[in-house]
Structures are given as C-alpha cells and as structure tokens.
Amino acid sequence: MLTLRALLFYLLMMVATVVCSLFSLVFASWMPFRQRFHVVVMANRFYIFALRWICGIRYRVHGLENLPKDRPFVLLANHQSEWETIYLQLLIQPLCTVLKRELLRIPFFGWALALLRPIAIDRAKRAGALKQLLGKGKNRLNDGIPVMIFPQGTRVPYGESGKFNKGGAMLACSAEVPVVPLCHNAGAHWPSGQLVKYPGLIEVEIGEPIETTDADVNEVHQRSTDWIQQRLDRQRGDVTEAKTATDGS
C-alpha cells in the first residue's frame, strides 16, 4: 500500500511540475522577483498537500518566532531528503537557495527553478564555488533576500550527522547578517533515494538567531553546528532506541 501511495504521489508530482513550470515560465517570468516567487512555488504547495493526503506526511514547526522579520539572514539547515527543499521555500518567502548547478538542467523543473534566482554552484570546483557563494550570496542578502544553505553539502540519512562546511558562516559574517540554524527529521518519513514514503509527523525546529557583527567565523560556525548537531544526536538516539525495540520484539 505504501508503494502504491508513493507511485500515485510521484505521478501527480510530475504532472504538477510540468503544469506549474509552464505556467510560471509563461506568466511569471516577467514579474518582479518577489511576486514571481509566490507564483513559482505554487507547485511546492501542491507537493506538500499531496504528501499529507496521499502519503500521510504532516509537519509541525517550532520556533517560528526566531525568524528575523526585519532583516535578511542566512538559514543553515540539515539535509536529509527532498522534503526540506520543497517546504522551506514555503516557510520563508522569498528565499534564495544554494544548490548544485545540475538541477537547473532538469526539463521543466529546472527551468522554473531558475526563476527563483538560486545560487547554482559547481561542487567540483571548490574554490570557485565558495567565491560564487560569497559574491552572489552577499548580493541576495543586500537585496533583502534570505539565503538558505545546507552546510552538510549533500543529503545525509536520518540518524546520521555528516560533515558541516563553513561557507554559510563565512557568508553571514561577510554580510554581517545573523545565522539561523534549523533542524528537522524529514528523512524519517521521506528517505533519500527510496520510493516509499512513511506516514507520520515531520518536526521542524528553528533556533535563535546567531549574530555575526564583529564575530569570528569559526565561532559562528561552531555555535550553529553545535545547535544542529545536538538535535541530530537526539535523532540518532531515537533511531537506536527504535532498532533496539524492534530487535527485542
């Protein structure tokens, strides 16, 4: 049954992607960026709706009050699945996402994604990627647009940590904007690389902003990483406890 639900979800997701992408390219490409953003992410709204009613995946957000309302910021989030790339663009609007360049080459999806002014980097060229992140990231922040970075660089399975890069902290310190850490457990319900989606509640937790004015990059990186790591450690404990219970049954 879970497999059939997932197949139905992906079928509707593909149809919605094509329809919404074409609509965005025809009617929204000429709009000012902030208006265009709301149009393009209509597809995201449908994905989240379909996940709830077809796959039984809901979500709950803690710490919304920690999102700065009057200034841009750098959002640092853990990366476990596709869910967070979809939902976080609804949580914060507009939002500039740092992503791999290859995504913009995907028909329909990539074409519409380019309208959101993401920072598309070539991960094979580390020095050039960092320079691009700092340059374009600062431009977006100067325009008042928050920037979202996945410091782990790639998807890390639920219950694991991975390595955290300093690019987000470097950008925030360079632009003198706060860092906002965010952690979630989306990988428990939408595991990366798997077809099946598991019903349940995705918990999203937003930490307090970390100020960067006159702050040391290493300190900002450590504070944000520690915050996320503590919550990932708790996830790891949940996985271990669940496995122990299963093995003992």
Image (cartoon, grey):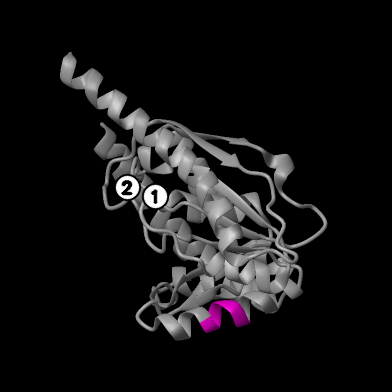
Identify the residue at the far right of this view: 70
Q: Is residue 23 above or below residue 197?
A: below
| Residue tagged 2 | 157
Q: Residues within 10 Å of mark 2 (few under 14, many from 20)?
A: some
Q: Determine if the magenta segment contains residue 147.
A: no
What kind of element bears circle 2? loop
Q: Residues within 10 Å of mark 1 (few under 14, many from 20)?
A: many
Cα–Cα span, label 2 and label 1: 6 Å
For this view, does 89 lie left or right of residue 33?
left
Residue depicted at 37% across the width and 48% down the height:
161
Which percent across, then down, holds residue 220?
A: 61, 59
Q: Is residue 169 above or below residue 131?
A: above
Choose the circle earlier in sequence order: 2 or 1.
1
Q: Are marks 2 and 1 in contact (CB under 8 Å)?
A: yes
**Label at residue 32:** none
| Residue tagged 1 | 80
Type of the residue with mark 2: Pro
Type of the residue with mark 1: Gln
Which percent across, then down, holds residue 34?
A: 73, 67
Residue depicted at 46% across the width and 45% down the height:
229
Which percent across, then down, holds residue 133?
A: 55, 77
Residue depicted at 71% across the width and 48% down the height:
67
State the extent of the magenta-drawn residues as a range: 131-135
Viewer-closest of 1 and 152:
152
Res. 118 visible in picture: yes
- Work out which quarter of the rendered image holds the C terminus and state it: top left
Q: For residue 126, which quarter of the picture?
A: bottom left
Res. 44 visible in picture: no
What kind of element bears circle 1? loop
